[in-house]
Structure formats: structure tokens, C-alpha cells
């Protein structure tokens, strides 16, 4: 079965769905608490609880208690979660380029305020991904 060895299929299985992507987006912007995610996303509490559990089990978030009375947890990005930020930025850049009929927010460098233009580069060849043919090598 092709998906058994497909890195894209494995990655998508760890992330889940659009809600999970948006939770990771918000976490990368500093949101950590259940109520912050709920307010930002307008998501049903039951769905948010499931998505946070899935992202925690997948190792993208870690749950940490910040209050004992009442018991309250926060969700922090792990290294794997922080490594996902470029993927989110690329999805956003793709949407702006191909589905930006409505004005969409932009990503900017926090220090300079300059809008960023994300690209994915192959570290071996220095070529921008998408400019050269690729092939899948069996595991």
C-alpha cells in the first residue's frame, strides 16, 4: 500500500483536520489556553477537546497544568509543533496566491515589519521546491 510509506499520508494522519491546523496556527501566535483557542476559533468545546488531545498524542503540543484550583491546563508547542510553523506559513502563502480574491492577512517579520515571501528550498541543491521534478524513492 502506497500510503503505508508515504510521508505526506503520515503527516496528515498526525495533524488530523483543518481545526488542528488552526489550533497550531494560534499556538504559534502564543495562545496556550483552552478558552483562548475556543474564543479565537469559535469551535465547539467537545471538538476542541478532541483536537487538543490528538495534537498532544501526536507530539505537537504538550499539556501542562498551570492552576490546581480549579485545575486548568495549557497547551504548549513542542519542538515538532514549532517545526510545523513553516508548513502553516506555506499553506497561507499558497492560499493568498491562488485563493486570495478576498483580502487575506499577511505574514511579516516581527522585527522589521516587512512582509515575508516564504519559499521551500532543497538544502542539497539550493533549488526552490517546485522548480525541478521530484520522484518518490521507496523506503
Image (cartoon, rainbow, N blue to C red):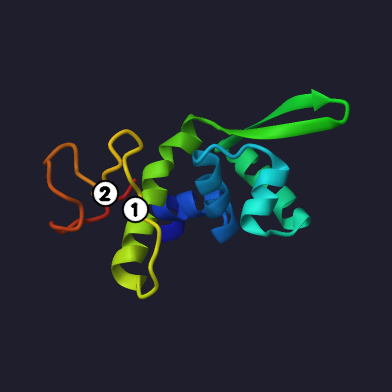
Which residue is rendered at x = 20% and y = 44% of the image? Answer: 121
Relative to 12, say whether 27 is above or below.
above
Which residue is rendered at x = 33% and y = 64% of the image? Answer: 96
The answer to whether 68 appears left or right of 102 in the picture is right
Could you say which is closer to the camera, residue 123 or residue 21? 21
Could you say which is closer to the camera, residue 114 or residue 120? 114
Q: Residue furthest front?
A: 113
- Across and down, in percent, residue 23 comes to 58, 49
The answer to whether 4 appears left or right of 89 in the picture is right
Q: Residue furthest bottom?
A: 101
The answer to whether 89 appears left or right of 15 in the picture is left
Instruction: Give the residue at mark 2.
Output: 118
Relative to 68, say whether 102 is above or below.
below
Which residue is rendered at x = 14% and y = 57% of the image? Answer: 131
Relative to 8, say whether 80 is above or below.
above
| Quarter placement of the C terminus | top left
For marks 1 and 2, the one nearer the N-term is: 1
Q: Residue furthest right?
A: 69
Question: Can the viewer see residue 51?
Answer: no
Which residue is rendered at x = 36% and y = 37% of the image? Answer: 110
SS at mark 2? loop
Instruction: Give the residue at mark 1.
Output: 90
The answer to whether 6 appears left or right of 134 in the picture is right
- Across and down, in percent, residue 101 comes to 35, 75
Marker disc for residue 65:
none
Give the Cα distance between marks 1 and 2: 6 Å
Q: Residues within 10 Å of mark 1 (few under 14, many from 20)?
A: some
SS at mark 1? helix
- Across and down, in percent, residue 112 comes to 28, 36
Q: Residues within 10 Å of mark 2 (few under 14, many from 20)?
A: some
Task: Tell me, yes or no, whether the two marked residues, 1 and 2, touch with CB atoms within 8 Å.
Answer: yes
Question: Can the viewer see residue 110?
Answer: yes
Amino acid at each position: 500500500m502506497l500510503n503505508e510509506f508515504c510521508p505526506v499520508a503520515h503527516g496528515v494522519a498526525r495533524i488530523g483536520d483543518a481545526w488542528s491546523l488552526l489550533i497550531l496556527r494560534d499556538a504559534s501566535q502564543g495562545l496556550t489556553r483552552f478558552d483562548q483557542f475556543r474564543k479565537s476559533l469559535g469551535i465547539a468545546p467537545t471538538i476542541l477537546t478532541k483536537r487538543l488531545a490528538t495534537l498532544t498524542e501526536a507530539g505537537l503540543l504538550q499539556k501542562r497544568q498551570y492552576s490546581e484550583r480549579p485545575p486548568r491546563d495549557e497547551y504548549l508547542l513542542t519542538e515538532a509543533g514549532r517545526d510545523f510553523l513553516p508548513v502553516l506559513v506555506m499553506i497561507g502563502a499558497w492560499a493568498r496566491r491562488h485563493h486570495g480574491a478576498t483580502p487575506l492577512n499577511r505574514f511579516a517579520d516581527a522585527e522589521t515589519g516587512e512582509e515575508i515571501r516564504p519559499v521551500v528550498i532543497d538544502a542539497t541543491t539550493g533549488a526552490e521546491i517546485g522548480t525541478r521534478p521530484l520522484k518518490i524513492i521507496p523506503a
